[in-house]
Amino acid sequence: MTTIAKLMGSGVPAAQAQATTAGVPLSGLAAAGVSSQANATLITSDLSVFTTVPASTAGARLPAASAPSLTAQAGDIFVVVNSTATAMNVYPPVGGNFAGVAVNTAVVLPAAKVGDFYCLGNNVWAASIGG
């Protein structure tokens, strides 16, 4: 469950929950893993800023519905910022996929780009890679 959803679940109005979490990303993250979803850095915030991406196929992995630190539900959006000069992989949860893509296959988040990752439900995701 994203931070905003958790706040709303505790009774905070939606607009206030959104304002509360604005500008509070988890930053200074390092991408991990070498072409492997299993040891990629687990996303534990709905706004994650990566400042270290090794010159390999390092990446990050979106949370599953059963992730202990953060769960993904249909309708959740996770923003991943790659603030480095190296492209990184963003993987679905183990056993998950991006709509229309093979299970456990990553999408590439280019250097200096932002990706929005939408949970469609049941570990199926959609990606929007932008500026």
Image (cartoon, rainbow, N blue to C red):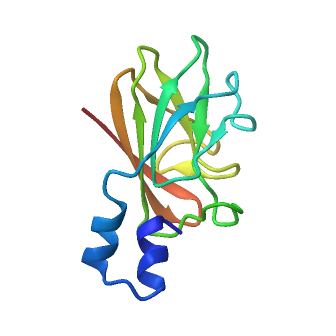
Tell me what residue is drawn at x 53 percent, y 57 percent: 124
Q: Residue furthest bottom?
A: 11
Q: Residue furthest right?
A: 38
Q: Is residue 83 above or below residue 14?
A: above
Q: Left or right: where does residue 33 sit relative to residue 105? A: right
Q: Is residue 26 above or below residue 30?
A: below
Total numbered labels: 0
What is the x, y in percent for residue 68?
71, 63
Q: Left or right: where does residue 39 sit relative to residue 62? A: right
What is the x, y in percent for residue 16?
28, 75
Q: Nearer the viewer, residue 26 or 85?
A: 26
Tell me what residue is drawn at x 39 percent, y 52 percent: 24
Tell me what residue is drawn at x 69 percent, y 51 percent: 95
Q: Quadrant of residue 36?
A: top right
Q: Is residue 85 above or below residue 15?
A: above
What is the x, y in percent for residue 63?
61, 54
Tell me what residue is drawn at x 64 percent, y 42 percent: 104
Q: Nearer the viewer, residue 19 or 59?
A: 19
Q: Quadrant of residue 109?
A: top left
Q: Quadrant of the C terminus?
A: top left
Q: Left or right: where does residue 75 sit relative to residue 53? A: left
Q: Residue furthest top?
A: 55
What is the x, y in percent for residue 79?
40, 47
